[in-house]
Amino acid sequence: MKLSIGTLRPCTVPSPKCVSSSVHCSAVKPAAAAATLGQRWTEYQGARNWEGLLDPLDDNLRDEILRYGQFVGATYNAFDFDPSSPSYAKCRFPKSSLFRRCGLPHTGYQVTKNLHATSGITMPRWAGKAPNWFSNQTSWIGYVAVCEDEDEIARLGRRDVVVAYRGTATCLEWFENLRATLTHLPGKTNVDIDEPEPMVAKGFLNLYTSGTKEIRSLREEVREEIGRVLQSYGDEPLSLTITGHSLGAALATLTAYDITTNFRQPPLVTVISFGAPRVGNRGFRCHVENCGSKVLRIVNSDDLVTKVPGFVIEDEDDDVSNKEKDTVNVAGLPSWLQRRVEDTLFQTQWVYADVGRELRVSSRDSPYLTGPTTNLATSHELDTYLHLVNGFLSSECPFRKTAKKMLSRRSAEKAPVLR
């Protein structure tokens, strides 16, 4: 999801060159930091729900978030946004050179599978004569990449598999974003009698499960490739990291749920999402957590997309394990009407719940993103998210003064990654 409909590349942050989010997370780390990352990799992947690592933000975790953000950036750089191009909505680069041509020559990972998303919207007959940008039903959405470099595997402490998704780019993807009513998940699920049945946004689910005669659904592509990876490397220490921005962040959460519920003894499955919209209801949240998926949402307080769709369920208790005090938050309503809304909305298809742990940043904290008005589109950009994570220290000291200098140095070390 983006805030302006179109096929242009994501805009860059309107800030000095030194804070462009061409962030470089060097694969070469000090020996002590590398040892800590490798020895504690399960913690950094969320095995303990990132307790003690988010506020203040642990330096190793910051680097890992930025590194996965670069993998998402590659999905934008590799996507053909030109509707006049014969390869519109496809990947511009072959798998063997995708990272290098996107400005990431030293990741240690190899792309093993291209992934595609198909809209489930039934097109009218006349759509066959419509421009390609309007009628394109299936598009390249991202990739699967496996860490194959022995030095990088040693640094990480395990072999890592990345699934990366881009945000909204095509017309039909926009239409799917607007299909925000909750719908039941396919297949049978074991539901706690005290929790509502798991439901997710209809449009997101359609993009994950729809396919054509020529191209299988995203769900089928992911299952096939993850099955192959588990068969090849299942005896090794293994992690599966699913990352995405905007629409891609929603698909990442659905992918994590799908993998943990359809594979026996899957590896540690972690979601690192940027600017994610809401995906499902409280039942879906409980199901994701019970299945073992670990979700870390990077949220910009000034990003409107993270506040939609629907109404949200908020926990009065900060303890993520306590789900007994959920209330529907509808701003500006008197208490008597609030209670009536709660009784009504819990039975509707518009009550959503945020999933996982949250790392909250804000454009207003950065001295390089200030202006007379808040730029809503810029607040949602992946570039902005990487810049804010780079500068974030803690809730007490939200932006470090050295961020500008560090970004300038890293920009000089390597060509820009994100445009």
Image: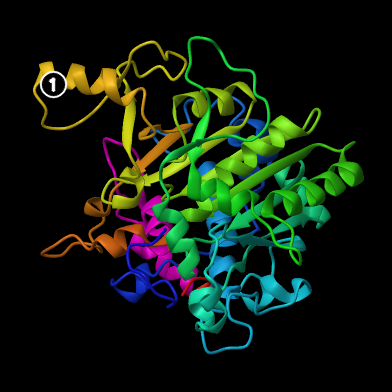
Task: Name above or below for residue 115 compared with residue 329.
Answer: below
Q: Which amino acid is tagged 1?
A: Leu
Q: Is residue 235 left or right of residue 406?
A: right
Task: Name above or below for residue 321 compared with residue 230.
Answer: above
Percent position of residue 35, x then y: 68, 40
Magenta-tinted stretch: 383-411
Task: Name above or below for residue 357 compared with residue 136.
Answer: above
**Would you identify the image quadrant in which residue 217 lies?**
bottom right
Residue underneath mark 1:
337
Q: Is residue 265 found inside the magenta-colored segment of the image?
A: no
User: Going 24% across and 62% down the picture, which residue do you hit?
Assistant: 369
Q: Please, which colouring scheme is shown?
A: rainbow
User: Going 49% across and 65% down the picture, which residue do you hit?
Assistant: 172
Q: Is residue 394 found inside the magenta-colored segment of the image?
A: yes
Percent position of residue 382, x then y: 43, 61
Q: Is residue 270 left or right of residue 250?
A: right
Percent position of residue 415, x then y: 54, 77
Percent position of residue 144, x then y: 72, 57
Which residue is nearer to you in this view: 14 or 406? 14
